[in-house]
Amino acid sequence: MAQKSALINVMTGAVMKVSRRLARDFGEINNLQVSMKGPADFVSTADTTAEKKLVEELQTARPNYGFLLEEKGEIKGKDTHNRWIIDPLDGTTNFLHGLPHFAISVALERDGEIVAGVIYDPAKDELFSAEKGQGAFMNGRRLRVSSRRNMEESLFATGIPFKGRTGHKTFLREAEAVMAVSAGIRRFGAASLDLAYVAAGRYDGFWETGLKPWDIAAGIILVREAGGFVTEIDGKRNMLESGSILAANDQIHTELGRILKKAGKTPA
């Protein structure tokens, strides 16, 4: 088991404290107060409580760092080089439907680069962590992306646009193209865990569009530190700005990107 750095210890400590309350809320899901945040996009008291606690814990450890938060937006810090990017509850819809597949995601961005990330799945007690140059881990075990080379043997994850999101027809073309050449597609509803699963070799690749920085920041460094490639679907590298992401092992990434780009072009 690798020795955790002080930074990863800080992030892990904050996430684990918050997870205990989140687990209790999940056990009492029917009592949660729920308000609409947009079409098919909900926010519960669990989100806001978890986010507030994460900010408190991380500010105690690193008082000058800034924040980019799902619920509260950006909080400027005195230290303009470092910023936490936080999703207190990724997979809110799963959570509110009693589906045990959701996560807390925390990343540290330093001078525009993601340098550390932690993703915790309370329902399965799986803690994923990575730091630049130090590798990726799950519950202390070193992670490595899968070694599959052939599309027909590969399993992929994605996100399906729902009510209020654009790109339905494009997604259907992409899914049809990937289904035709692969072992299957899964849609579990938490982008942070999709990326963690690519890092762990459970999925061979993942793609989605319309995402926010807090959905993918921690997962990006996990995949990279596990030996995988992460870009936008078109091959560019501005994932946090565009919300487009394609993550895969080093054998599959190029081919998957080619298939998705071809499928994504609007038919004549």
Image: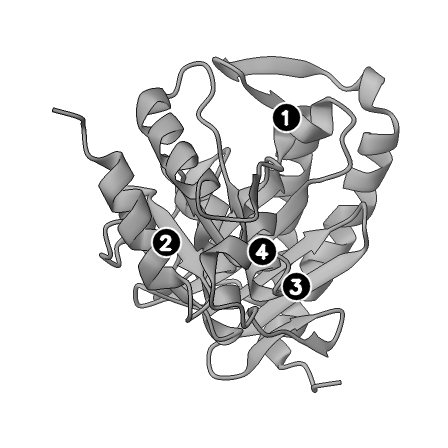
Residue 5 percent coordinates (x, y): 62, 82
Nearer the observer: mark 2 or 4; the answer is 2
In the image, what residue occupies the spot 64% across and 48% down?
Answer: 104
Circle 2: element type? helix
**Residues under labels 1 and 3: Cα distance?**
21 Å
Residue for badge 1: 93
Q: Element at badge 1?
A: helix
> What is the spatial separation of the Cα atoms under label 3 and label 4, in whole angstroms?
15 Å
> Residue at the spot x=46%, y=56% of the render?
151
Q: Which mark is residue 203?
A: 4
Q: CA distance from mark 2 to mark 4?
A: 13 Å
- Rounded to the nearest whole Å, what is the CA distance between mark 2 and mark 3? 25 Å
Q: Amino acid at mark 3?
A: Phe
The residue under label 2 is 256
Instruction: Measure the C-alpha gap from mark 4 to mark 1.
Output: 22 Å
* Residue type, numbered disc 1: Thr
The part of the image, by quadrant, that contains residue 153 is bottom right
Q: Position of residue 34 (x, y in %)?
A: 67, 15
Residue under numbered circle 3: 128
Snapshot quadrant of residue 251: bottom left
Q: Which of pointers 2 and 3 lies earlier in the amino acid sequence?
A: 3
Crowd class of label 2 (few under 14; some 14 to 19; many from 20; radius 10 Å): many
Report the amino acid beneath label 2.
Leu
Kindly indicate whether the residue at mark 4 contacts the one at mark 2 (C-beta within 8 angstroms).
no
Circles 4 and 1 in contact, beta carbons < 8 Å: no
- Among the two numbered marks 2 and 1 on one chain, the one whose residue lies closer to the N terminus: 1
Are the residues flagged by discs 1 and 3 in contact, CB closer than 8 Å?
no
Q: Left of 6 or right of it: where is 244?
A: left
Q: Residues within 10 Å of mark 1 (few under 14, many from 20)?
A: some
